[in-house]
Image (tube, rainbow, N blue to C red):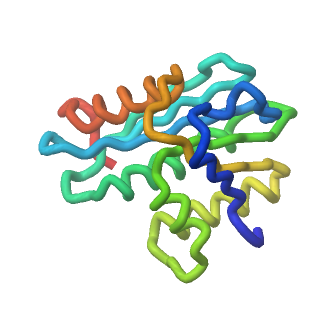
Amino acid sequence: MDTVKVNDNTDETTDGREDSKHSIQVYIDSSKSERGVGAGVVIFKDDKIIDTKKYKLDGHCSNNQAEQLAILKALENIQNMDTNDKTVQLYTDSRIALESLKNWKSHKHLTEKIRRKIIELERQNWKIEFNWVKAHPWHQGNELVGELAKEAATNSDIKER
């Protein structure tokens, strides 16, 4: 893997799904408040929601760590999918998470785990593209993943990761 493929749609309010040639779209988000830290993942296949996940993190974790955990967990879930079309677009509103993946001088634990998972997926013929989107552009996937992240952060019944 030479680089992490990232599309930076800073001037667009669209989420990019309308013209996506990727069969799988993944939305990730994180939430941090005085009540906790959480992350969410929503996976679409052929424009249908096929999976949702939520993760609770220790309250000392940063919003960026939650965003990176969501990316890692999304990639792990994708790897287990049974599909012939192995094209994925992953959407996040975290520039920090995307920049850390592109910065080869950054060797933080979660960043390295994500990079290793991307390499593993690419060896299995997956094509993964990361997209930055404006926070909550009123799309079902982005709104749902934001709700999941908030619920994970505030729900004491969810086990911390």
Q: How many marks?
A: 0
Seen from the viewer's position, the closer of residues 78 and 19 is 19
Residue 66 in the image, given as x and y percentages of width and height: 37, 51
Q: Residue at x 36, y 26 (%)?
A: 147
Q: Is residue 132 left or right of residue 69?
A: right
Q: Residue at x 18, y 33 (%)?
A: 156
The residue sitting at the left extreme is 34
Q: Quadrant of residue 30?
A: top left
Indicate whether 4 appears above or below 28.
below
Q: Quadrant of the N terminus?
A: bottom right
Seen from the viewer's position, the closer of residues 108 and 99 is 99
Residue 16 in the image, given as x and y percentages of width and height: 67, 34
Q: Residue at x 72, y 25 (%)?
A: 18
Residue 86 in the image, given as x and y percentages of width and height: 81, 40
Q: Quadrant of residue 117?
A: bottom right
Q: Is residue 161 left or right of residue 109?
A: left
* Res 76 visible: no
Indicate whether 118 appears above or below 93.
below
Seen from the viewer's position, the closer of residues 24 and 97 is 97
